[in-house]
Image (cartoon, grey):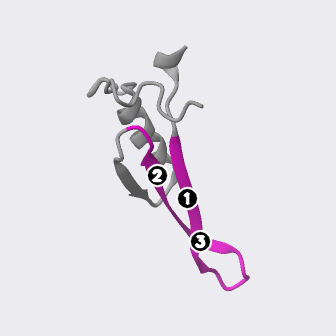
Amino acid sequence: MQGDTFSFIVRIWHEALDGEGRVAVWRGSIDHVGNGEQAHFDDLDQMLQFIQQQIGLDGRRSPSPASIGAGKA
């Protein structure tokens, strides 16, 4: 089971409200705990794309040995 676990730290915050007090702009950052790579995003699709790249679901990269099992106790 170690090879199929990855850890990320996700931070999400709002930067602007509309005229009615609703959140108009969300921002975020994500860190891959195993390899230290980080990305910033404006929407959840960008966050998901980063995760897919990091764990090899997009076909462009394989998980690094150092990231496999990262964050396990």
Mark number, residue 11: 1
CA distance for labels 2 and 1: 6 Å
CA distance for labels 3 and 2: 15 Å
Q: Three-letter amino acid code at disc 2?
A: Ile
Work out whether 52 lies above or below 13.
Answer: above
Screen quadrant of the C terminus? top right
Q: Residue at x 53, y 49 (%)?
A: 9
Say if mark 2 contacts mark 1, CB within 8 Å: yes
Q: Residue at x 64, y 81 (%)?
A: 18
Question: In this rendering, would 73 be left or right of 49?
Answer: right
Q: Position of residue 39 (x, y in %)?
A: 38, 54
Question: In this rendering, would 26 be left or right of 29?
Answer: right
Q: Earlier in the sequence, mark 2 or mark 1?
A: 1
Question: In this rendering, would 9 be left or right of 66?
Answer: right
Q: Three-letter amino acid code at disc 3?
A: His
Tell me the magenta residue range: 8-34
Q: Nearer the viewer, mark 3 or mark 2?
A: 2
Q: Earlier in the sequence, mark 3 or mark 2?
A: 3
Q: Position of residue 13 (x, y in %)?
A: 58, 67
Mark 3 secondary-structure assignment:
strand
Mark 2 secondary-structure assignment:
strand
Mark number, residue 65: none
Seen as rendered, the residue at the extreme top is 1
Seen as rendered, the residue at the extreme left is 60
Q: Which residue is mark 2?
A: 30
Q: Is residue 46 visible?
A: no
Work out whether 16 lies above or below 58.
Answer: below
Q: Position of residue 53 (x, y in %)?
A: 35, 34
CA distance for labels 3 and 1: 10 Å
